[in-house]
Every structure is written in structure tokens, then in C-alpha cells.
Amino acid sequence: MSDERLQRGWDTVRKINASAAQQQWDELTAVYPDFARYIVHSAYADVLARPALPLREREIATLAALTALGNAPGQLKAHIEGALNVGLTREEICEVLMQMAVYAGVPAAINAMKIAGEVFGGRET
Amino acid sequence: MSDERLQRGWDTVRKINASAAQQQWDELTAVYPDFARYIVHSAYADVLARPALPLREREIATLAALTALGNAPGQLKAHIEGALNVGLTREEICEVLMQMAVYAGVPAAINAMKIAGEVFGGRET
Amino acid sequence: MSDERLQRGWDTVRKINASAAQQQWDELTAVYPDFARYIVHSAYADVLARPALPLREREIATLAALTALGNAPGQLKAHIEGALNVGLTREEICEVLMQMAVYAGVPAAINAMKIAGEVFGGRET
Amino acid sequence: MSDERLQRGWDTVRKINASAAQQQWDELTAVYPDFARYIVHSAYADVLARPALPLREREIATLAALTALGNAPGQLKAHIEGALNVGLTREEICEVLMQMAVYAGVPAAINAMKIAGEVFGGRET
Amino acid sequence: MSDERLQRGWDTVRKINASAAQQQWDELTAVYPDFARYIVHSAYADVLARPALPLREREIATLAALTALGNAPGQLKAHIEGALNVGLTREEICEVLMQMAVYAGVPAAINAMKIAGEVFGGRET
Amino acid sequence: MSDERLQRGWDTVRKINASAAQQQWDELTAVYPDFARYIVHSAYADVLARPALPLREREIATLAALTALGNAPGQLKAHIEGALNVGLTREEICEVLMQMAVYAGVPAAINAMKIAGEVFGGRET
């Protein structure tokens, strides 16, 4: 796996949520370094960095998936921050989460909305 | 529940996928009419019709959720058609589905991509 | 595992849906007989046969779970038949399925309602 | 959306678990008020308030779904309290949760049973 | 249910993770004793104690399932300890968890890897 | 992405289930070629080809995950064939699937056992 691929992955990571990604990298590297690298390579360099969809729309898809699956509140929090970072407004984020009540049920949407509340409460903008 | 609410729901239904929605309405009305109305009211009039997010971005969220949950191939097919109807390209749709390999696993994305193949194969554009 | 336990399991099976259970027993016995016996023992004799909840209310719980999980349409069909067999009306069954739109999302409830339509369409009462 | 619909929703909310619902309303209103109203309208007024199924049986279905899905421990807690409020005994509630071991696996049922233990431990009756 | 069956279950429990199982037994017995016994009987005596698959390979299957489902972090922790107890190395455990990124998505694997990190951090070997 | 990586992926693919993989490659290449390549790279070359766990044990993990998730019957079928190809016996495969009744519920295990029956019925050994 080339340095170029790792670089491309980190470039995308940084546009979405540099601090959350750094913290996750550190945590996972302490457990199993190959897995930390795999995520940057396979998720960020090979998928999220692809130019065919802008990061704004990729974050909408990610918010929808993490809300619907409901299996990763920490990562949903990081991507609500990421969605703000790539230009979504708070209202737009809440609309995506609310829409998930239709597709994944009301409890899934409530869980996500509470996480959004935590993120919004801790930020200036 | 007012006629106005039903009307607003159907207006949104028709922008996304009028023929699939009509077929589903007919099928569900034959089983339990209140449930057919509930969907138009509660999903379409009360959520999807809200102007705070354009239908293009709502369909991205819906494709992501249905691919990640993997529980409704018929409805995913209807919304891949719907995504084309509201202006996403085939490439953009495939990017959303491919991105779900990261969040929901490769099998979920494969299932969705095969459904996209069926939709694309049956259309001129 | 005693004969008494197998007998108690089958007594409960027969109250819910004897013909669907017999067919499943035959199919699974052809693949792995220990697993077929395990289901009668562990699911029916040890849980569903317990007198602390009537079968009518156990079937409501089963319909809710199978609709929400959405992973077993064949078994949902067998338990919609079973719910009718232990005394639920068609309207009551549809109310349980419709309620799942709130907890598991509209697509899960639609899938189940279509299966209910198949069951109802093939029965006199 | 009419006042009558909001009123009907709150009437049902209060029969199940008034204090938990009020707390959730306050939390969600602070994040996105339209979503708080949507839940009372769409979940409570349009579904749970329907008279075709008594609240006792609706709560059985809700306990089954939330245990099986396992995605909302806070809401499962509120509905175990709600089930007691509408007349289920502790034993009946435990039977519903135990039955979910069959349909959703032992871990899902264990998680729910521990939440039931917390609820029971904090109440007189 | 015979004493022999309970004994066989506990023999298997103890080979995997005696202390975690005892704690869970105590917790569940305080809520609903029949459910605590059901788990030892139905999960351990009737399935995990079967000799046709060694415990090492059963624990691989359990780690994979709990990581993929993501619904029971406490039990995943107990089974990562159990996997070490029946002879898997830390590296082998991490490989199973990492493999789940392919089948269940990256977030599910990250959650599990962090739990593995907690287990490893608290043990000498 | 280098040729070496694609080669390493295909080497692993062929050890598990060459014909099913070729068919899937052809289907996905017709829809979105980048996604077909992504699977060989990211799932096979970067994860399943890693030598730290033998393919026999990787297939146990895969069978467990696909049975528990229940979202990909076609891929479960391909991996039951793959498990036979890398040396598991029919009995060992059935034990893995049966064990999933404990972790993911009886319906998930029944679905998988029926697929195993189809695979076994169509093979000499």
C-alpha cells in the first residue's frame, strides 16, 4: 500500500473531521495498527475521496446510514460535526435525521437528534 | 386528517416516483386502507414534502438508508428510479450505494448495486 | 432431552400453526435433525409453552418482532396465520403491523402488510 | 396540523408514560421543535391512539420491537414503565422479553432484561 | 429440566468465561430466575457444549456475530475474554474483528476493536 | 491501485469460491466496474488474504456474520460453498449456523440452514 494512497485518505479525513479522525487513529493504532491504516485506505482513499460525489452529499449519505443503523453513536457525532464542516446547516442536518424516522423508525431518529443536540450545544456556530 | 394534507403528500409522491407509489397505494389499500393513507400523510406530507431539504438530497438519504438497512429491495428499486427522476445521474447513485460498503458492509452494497443494475437496464436514460 | 419436553413443544406448535411447523420440521430434519429438535425444545417447549402469557399475546409479540427485524418473511407468514389461529382478527393483526412503522420504519411495516395481504387473500376467514 | 391532533396524541402519551414523554419532548424541542411535534402527531395521534387495539397489547408489541431491535435502551426503559402503567405485571413483561431470545437472540433479551431490572428496582410496585 | 443439563451448561460456561457468566447469572437471577436458567440450558448445554465444533472455533463464530450485530458490547467484551481463555491470540481476535468491516461495515468493526483494546489493556497476557 | 493488489485479491477469491466470485464480478462490472474492483481490493486483498488467520477460520467468521445479519442470502450460499472448499465438513457448517440461533435468533438460523440444505443437495460431496 503506497504512501500516495494514505496521503489521499488523510486529505479527505481532514476535510471532514480532522480532530475526531486523529483521535480514532490514535485509539485504533494502540490496538491494531493495520486496522487503523485499513480505514484510511479503504474507506477514505478508495471511497470517500472519489470526486464523483461532493463531500456535502457524501455526508448526507453517511448521516442517513449511521442514523438508520444506529450502531455507532460516536461516529455519528463525528459525522454531524463533519457535516457542519463541509457546509450543511443545522436545519439541513436535522432534516436528514428526521427523515430517518420514516425509513428506520422513530427511536432511531430520536437517538440521532439527541446526539445532534449535544454537538450543536458545544459549538459557537 | 385533512384533504390538504393528503394532497401535499401526493404532490411529493408524484415528483419522486408516481407509478411505483400508485401501485403500492393500490396494494396496501386492498389490505388495510388506513395504513396506505398513513404513509402518504406521515411519510410524504409531514416529512418528505418539507422544503428545508431539496428532493435530490432527500433521495440520497433514502438510498443510503435503504441500502444500509437492506430490508426493502422493492422500495430501494422504487427510490433508485425516484433518484433518477429528481435528477441524480447513474454514476452519482452508484457512488451512494458504493459508499454504503463502508458503513454497512460489502454485502449490503452488492445487493443494492444489483438492484441498480436492474433499474438501469430497463430504462432508456 | 426427554420425550416429555418434545411433546410439550409440539402441543404448542400445533396450537399456533401445525401445518407450517410440520413443513419446517421436515425441511430442517432433512438438513440437520438436531437443529429441528432444538427449535421444538428450546423455542416452543421452553419459552412459548410457558403459561404466564396467553398465546394470543405471545403472537402479538412475535408479529411485532418479525415485522421489526424483517429477516424472515416465511416465518412472519406462518405467524400471521398463527395469530389468526389463536384468535386475533385481521384488523388487530394489521394494527400490530402498522404500529411497527413507528418503531422500525415504514418499509418494514409495508413488507409485513403485503405478507398479511397474501395470507388473508388465501383464506376463507 | 390541527390542535385536535396534538391533543389526541398527548392524551395517549399520558396514559403510557407522561413523565418520560414530557422529558423527551423538552429535550427534542430544544434541538428541533418540528420533530418533537412530529412524534406526538405521527406516532401517538395517528397510530398508538387508534382504538382497534388496547394499549396493553400495543405495549406488548412495543416491548417486543424495542427488545428485538435493541437500538433504543432509553425508550425501552420508558415503555417498560409504560407497560406497568397500562396494566402488565412484572412477570408478563419478563415473559415478553424472554420470548425475544427466540426471535432476536439471547443477547438482545439479556440487554432488555437488565433494563427491566433497573425499572423494577426503582419502583414500589 | 434435569440437573444433568444444567451441569453440562455450566461446564461449558466455565471453559469460556466463568467470572463474567457468574456475574450475568447473578444479575439475571435477581430479575427473572427462569431466564437465567434458560440461557445456561438453551445456549450453553444445548448448543455451545456440543462436541462437533471446538470451543476455539465457536468463539470465532461468536465474536463475528456479536461484532456484526453490534447490539451487545458487554457480551462482546465477555467473549473477547473467552476467546483468549480458549486459546486465540490477540492478533487472531483482531483479525476476526477487522474482517467484520467487510461484512458489517467499518463502524461495527471499530466499535469491537475498541472493546478489544479495553480487554487487552486490563490483562497481563 | 496496483496489479499486484488485484492479483493477491483474486488468488484468495479463487481459494474460496472461484465460480461464484467470477459471476459476481461479471454482474457488478456491468453496473459499476469501480465497485467490482473495490471488492477484490478492499475485501479480498486487504483483509481476507492476510495470513494471520487461516481461510478455514475466516470462513467460520463469514458464515456467522452472514447468518446473523441475514441480509445477503446469495452471498451466504456462496460462502457455504466456500466453507466446503476450504475444508469444513457439512456438520461443522451446520454447527456454526445452529449456534447463530443463540446470538441472532432462531429465524436467522433457520433461513441459513435452508440455504445450506440447497447447497448440500446440489453437490456430490
Image (tube, coloured by chain):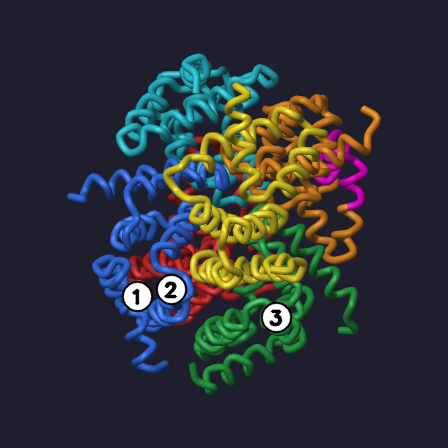
Chain colours: A blue, B yellow, C orange, D cyan, E red, F green
Q: Are marks 2 and 1 on the same chain?
A: yes
Name the mark nearer the viewer: 2 or 3. 3
Q: Are marks 1 and 3 in contact (CB under 8 Å)?
A: no
Which chain hosts label 3?
F
The numbered mark 2 sits on a residue in which chain?
Answer: A
In this view of the protein, which residue sits in the foreground, F91 or B102?
Answer: B102
Q: Is residue C11 magenta?
A: yes
What segment is highlighted magenta in the picture? C5-23
Label number found at residue F42: none
Discs 1 and 3 share one subunit: no
Within 10 angstroms of label 1, few (less than 14), some, or many (20 or more) residues?
Answer: some
Judged from the image, the secondary structure of the residue bearing numbered disc 3 is helix
- Please name the predominant secondary structure of the magenta segment in the image: helix
Q: Check disc 3: other Cα within 10 Å, few if <14, some if 14-19, many if 20+.
A: few
Is B5 contained in the magenta span?
A: no
Where in the figure is residue E64, as x and y percent of width and height? 49, 60
Residue drawn at point x = 35 percent, y = 26 percent = D121
Rendered image: mark on residue A12: 1
Residue B68 relative to residue D32: left or right: right
Q: Residue at x 46, y 41 (%)?
A: D70
The residue that mark 3 highlights is: F30
Q: Which residue is mark 2?
A: A48
> SS class of the residue under badge 2?
helix
